[in-house]
């Protein structure tokens, strides 16, 4: 599972999943929780956050074997709020 946190584009963090990532891990799934660039008063990140998601997915595939995952199996993407939109 590759998880993208919520936070209205301006907050949140990979470690704040509200227990969602723990549930998947308890089921035996490998979970990668991802941070992405957040918007600030001075900078919108609508064009940067999707690029961060793409980088995270590439990283996950490249490191899947080292993380104990089978790259031939389906990867499930999950997120809430802004993370779900990504």
Image (cartoon, grey):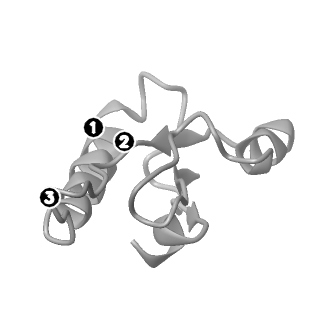
Taking 15 as reference, is 48 left or right? left
Image quadrant of residue 19?
A: top right
Q: Nearer the viewer, mark 1 or mark 3?
A: 3
Q: Are marks 1 and 2 in contact (CB under 8 Å)?
A: yes
Label 2, residues with CA under 10 Å away: few <14, some 14-19, many ≥20: many
Residue on which the image places disc 1? 62
Label 3, residues with CA under 10 Å away: few <14, some 14-19, many ≥20: few
Q: Residue 72 or 62: which is nearer the viewer?
A: 62
Residue under the point 52% across and 41% down: 33
Residue on which the image places disc 3? 43
Residue under the point 40% across and 63% down: 9
Residue furthest bottom in the image: 85
Tell me the element at label 2. helix
- For the C terminus, the image quarter is bottom left
- The percent coordinates of residue 80 (x first, y second) are 61, 67
Q: Nearer the viewer, mark 2 or mark 3?
A: 3
CA distance separating discs 1 and 3: 30 Å
* 27 w.r.t. 49: above or below: above
Q: Residue 55 or 63: which is nearer the viewer?
A: 55
Tell me the element at label 3. loop
Taking 60 as reference, is 68 left or right? right
CA distance separating discs 1 and 2: 5 Å
Residue on which the image places disc 2? 60
Counting residues from the start of the chain, the first of labels 1 and 3 encountered is: 3
- The percent coordinates of residue 54 (x first, y second) are 24, 58
Image quadrant of residue 10?
A: bottom left
CA distance separating discs 2 and 3: 27 Å
- The percent coordinates of residue 35 (x first, y second) are 40, 42
């Amino acid at each position: 599972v590759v998880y993208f946190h919520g936070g209205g584009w301006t907050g949140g963090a990979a470690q704040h999943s509200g227990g969602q990532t723990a549930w998947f891990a308890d089921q035996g799934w490998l979970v990668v929780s991802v941070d992405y660039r957040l918007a600030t008063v001075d900078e919108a990140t609508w064009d940067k956050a999707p690029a961060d998601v793409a980088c995270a997915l590439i990283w996950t595939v490249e490191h899947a074997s080292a993380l104990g995952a089978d790259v031939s199996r389906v990867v499930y993407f999950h997120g809430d709020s802004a993370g779900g939109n990504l």
